[in-house]
Image (tube, helix red, strand yellow):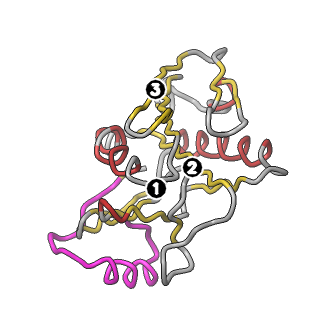
Amino acid sequence: MMMQAQQQRYYTPQEYLELEMNSENRHEYINGEIVTVTGGTPNHNQICLNLSGSLNFVLRDQPYRVFVADQRIWIPKKGIYAYPDVMVIQGKIKLQEGGKDTIINPLFVAEVLSDSTKKYDIGDKFAAYRNVPSFQEYILIDQDKIHLDHYYKTEPNKWIFSEYEGEDTILSLMSIPFEIDLRDVYNKVDFETD
């Protein structure tokens, strides 16, 4: 997914939400700036579909909800509205006060990396997510090769990092009863044409 900055004007969160409600495109909000979220590549979309579909199937009878791409979250301590590629919440959905469409309690987030968002997803966006009390686990999925980075919170301010490569590798999530072969995450992904 690619992001493009809008004109250099600062908006309040309320102005952003009003604009977003009437917009045909998705935008993220970062401390007063509005950034357009453009469509992803076929590989990006395939990876999101593979992961979210597997999560949704495995967690179907458990107290988790899986969301993909179009579900906005609010990170108040950092002043950020974001659209994670894949997100899981545990238990009841908690919404931003006064709204009906912005979640504030993600447990797990996955981002599929693109050239335009890679640095942000690994750096400032991950730092922002860490300010959400319910947030426990983060994966960053490379769309150009079979590789992902996995972060799991073990206690306040302590995260464990693991790296996965190769289609025979199994990713086991720690906050959710879920595991998946990387072969299935990358099913139908064509590295030569994307």
For disc 1, the marked residue is 39
Q: Secondary structure at mark 2?
A: loop
Looking at the rendered structure, the number of numbered marks drawn on it comes to: 3
User: Alpha-carbon neighbours of circle 1 within 10 Å: few (<14), some, or many (≥20)?
Assistant: few
- Of residues 51 and 130, the one nearer the viewer is 130
Q: From the top left corner, tell me how far across and down residue 136 is, in percent.
A: 52, 42
Q: Amino acid at mark 3?
A: Ile
Cβ atoms at labels 2 and 3 below 8 Å apart: no
For disc 2, the marked residue is 107
In the image, farthest residue toward the front: 155
Q: Quadrant of residue 95?
A: bottom right
The residues tagged by marks 2 and 3 sit, at their Cα atoms, a distance apart of 16 Å
| Numbered disc in front, either 1 or 2 | 2
Q: Amino acid at mark 1?
A: Gly
From the viewer's perspective, is 130 left or right of 193? left
User: Alpha-carbon neighbours of circle 3 within 10 Å: few (<14), some, or many (≥20)?
Assistant: few
Q: Secondary structure at mark 3?
A: strand
User: Alpha-carbon neighbours of circle 2 within 10 Å: few (<14), some, or many (≥20)?
Assistant: many
Q: Which residues are magenta?
A: 3-28
Residue 8: say if magenta: yes
Q: Residue at x 51, y 81 (%)?
A: 99
From the viewer's perspective, is 183 left or right of 107? right
Q: Earlier in the sequence, mark 1 or mark 2?
A: 1
Q: From the top left corner, tell me how far across and down residue 190 is, in percent.
A: 57, 30
Q: From the top left corner, tell me how far across and down residue 50 is, in percent.
A: 67, 40
- Of residues 45 and 27, the one nearer the viewer is 27
Q: Amino acid at mark 2?
A: Leu
For disc 3, the marked residue is 160
Q: Residue at x 32, y 77 (%)?
A: 13
Residue 164: say if magenta: no
The residues tagged by marks 1 and 2 sit, at their Cα atoms, a distance apart of 25 Å
